[in-house]
Amino acid sequence: MKASWRIFRRMQDSVLAVGLLVDAGAVVDAWRVLPGDASFKARLTLLFPVTYLIAVLAGSLALPAARKALKRHLWLSYRTGFGQSVVSVISGLGLLVAVAGLIVWQAHHLAAGGTSPGGAFSGYGAGLGLLLAQVILVRTLERDPDMVAEIAGDPEP
């Protein structure tokens, strides 16, 4: 397997891991500052986002057009070098942190009497579903006979 493919695959895994950790931090912060009982906080920060995560993940993998589009996106991202340079890694991870900052800001805004940040948590959950689908589809590309020759190279150490 080519080193560039291993780096790309590792980047997909890393983005998902960072996304999950950043979301966990935003949820912990939200539980600390949001008004209301545990049921309200659980719905807002856990139930709704997980529902969106599952819906996006299922749609991305089960709908042929969505799966094909995501595989094409992943292939084009690999071919253009995404996740294979310091700049692309920092920009990808920075975007996740920026979105989490938005969630934290909205949670604090609600704590001060503003509107509910439910959409932000649910949107982030949907984004995590998409990232998880990408991690799964990268492994699928590795088994695709048409792609094997493109990503084959030196065997993994």
Image (cartoon, helix red, strand yellow):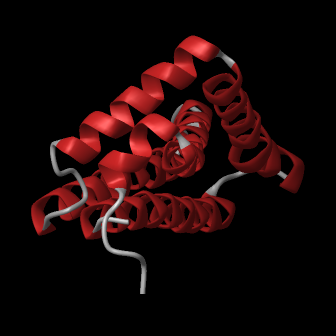
- Residue at the right extreme, as displayed: 39
Which residue: 41% across, 67% down? 10
Which residue: 55% across, 52% down? 139
On the image, the x and y values in percent for residue 85 come to 14, 64
Q: Is residue 124 left or right of residue 31?
A: left
**Quadrant housing residue 100:** bottom left
Judge whether 123 appears above or below 110 on screen.
above
* Image quarter of the C terminus: bottom left
Q: Is residue 68 left or right of residue 4?
A: right
Which residue: 58% across, 41% down? 133
- Residue at the bottom extreme, as displayed: 157
* Number of residue marks: 0
Which residue: 63% across, 60% down? 27
User: Which is more toward the observer, 122 or 73?
Assistant: 73
Judge whether 146 appears above or below 136 on screen.
above
Residue 22 in view (yes/no): yes
Judge whether 51 appears above or below 90 on screen.
above
Residue 36 in view (yes/no): no
User: Which is more toward the observer, 104 or 22?
Assistant: 22
**Quadrant housing residue 152:** bottom left
**Quadrant housing residue 1:** bottom left
On the image, the x and y values in percent for residue 141 come to 49, 43
On the image, the x and y values in percent for residue 21 come to 54, 68
